[in-house]
Amino acid sequence: MKRALITGVTGQDGSYLAEFLLDKGYEVYGVRRRTSTPNYENCKQIKDRIRWISADLTDLASLIEAVKLSNPDEVYNLAAQSFVAASWPQPIATAELTALSVTNMLEAVRIMKPSAKFYQASSSEMFGKVVETPQKETTPFYPRSPYGAAKVYGHWITVNYRESFDMFACSGILFNHESPRRGLEFVTRKVSDAAARIKLGLQQELRMGNLDSLRDWGFAGDYVKAMWLMLQQDEPDDYVISTGEMHTVRELLETAFSYVDLDYKDYVVIDPEFVRPAEVDLLLGDCTKAKEKLGWKLEVGFRELVHMMVDEDLKRVKAEIQFNESYTVAAK
Ligand code: GDP
C-alpha cells in the first residue's frame, strides 16, 4: 500500500486530494497545525480515515518527525497562506508560510526520505503582470503581490532541489481552482454565497472590488488528479494546469445571480476596501503539456462549476435557516 503525506490537508485542495488518494487505496497522512479550535469541515467525511500528524510548517524539526512517522512514497506540499489580498497586510507571515516553508518541507524530505516523490503547489499568481498570453511553463514570472513573490520562491527552490539533489520534485502551476469548499473570502465563493443569501433574504448587498479582472477558473476536484498524475511519471517536471478559458469577475456575478433569477446589478456595490494595491488583470493558462504528457483532462466547465457552488451554498444556507428556526422554537 502506498503512503502519501499531505500538508494543508484540511484546505480545499488537501481534502479533495485526500479523498482521491484514499479511493486509490493509499494510506494518507495529514499534517495538521495545532490550533485551539481545529476546523475539519472539508475533511468531515474522511476524518477517521486520515492518519493525523501534528506539525508546523515553520518548524523544521516537526516536519522531519512527520516524514519519519509517515515514511511516505509521495509528499504533497499544499499548505500555505493562500489568500492574495491578505499578503499585503501580512507580507512576512506570507513569506514564512508560503515561501520558506517549502524549503523546510524539502529539507525534511531530503534528510529523512530523499526517494519520496514531492509535489509543490505553485500558482498562476507567479505570472502576475503577464508577459505573454496564454501563459505556459516557459512564460517568465512577474508576480504582483507578496503572495505571488513567495510562490515564485517556492517554485524555484523545488526546481533547485530536483537539480541539486536529484530529488523527484515537481511543481504544479495551477490556475485558479474553486469548489464549494473554497474559503469564503475568495471571489467565486464570496459570490456564490452572496447569491444564495440574497436569494433567501439574508443579505441585501454585496461589496466587491475590481469586476474587470479576468481569471481562468477550474474545478479543484479535477485539479488534484493532475497533482497525482505528475508524481506517477518516469521523470519529475513542471506543469501548467488550467481550463484555457477566461471570464471576468462580472461574468462570474452574472452567471451566479442569473442562476437564482436575480440581477447582480441590483445588489453589487463597489467598495475600495476590496480593490488591491496591485492587480493581476488577466490569467489564462495553456495546459497542452499536461494534456499531452499526463493525459489530464478537465471534467467540469465554468458554468457547471458556478452552478455547483451556488447549489451547495443554497443547501447550506437553507439548513442554517432551519437550524435557527428550530433553535428559536426550542428556546420559547
Ligand atoms: P486570486 O486570483 O488568487 O487573487 O483569487 P481571488 O478569488 O481572491 O480573486 C480573483 C479576482 O477577483 C482578483 O482579480 C480580485 O481583485 C477580484 N475581486 C474583485 N472583487 C473581489 C472581492 O470582493 N474579493 C476577492 N477575493 N476578489 C475580488
Image: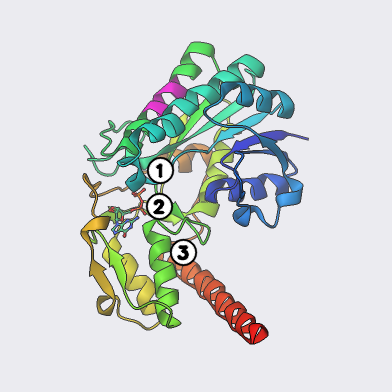
Q: Name the residue carrying label 1.
A: 287
Residue shown at 45%/82% (left/top)?
200
| Rendered-image quadrant of the C terminus | bottom right
Q: Tell whether label 1 touches label 2 (CB within 8 Å).
A: yes
Please name the residue that numbered disc 3 is placed on. 305
Look at the image and tell me whether residue 285 can be seen. no
Q: Which residues are magenta?
A: 153-159
Q: Is residue 314 left or right of residue 148?
A: right
Quarter of the image where one finds residue 32: top right
Amino acid on which disc 1 is placed: Cys
Kind of residue at disc 2: Thr
Quarter of the render that holds ligand 1: bottom left
Distance between the alpha carbons at the discs numbered 2 and 1: 8 Å
Amino acid on which the number 3 mark rests in the picture: Leu
* Rendered position, 212 above or below 80: below
**Residue visible at 44% across and 25% down in the picture:** 100
Whole-number angstrom distance, CA of label 1 to CA of label 3: 19 Å
217 left or right, relative to 181: left
For marks 2 and 1 on the same chain, the one whose residue lies earlier in the sequence: 2
Which label number is shown at residue 243? 2
Residue positioned 64% across, 31% down in the render: 74
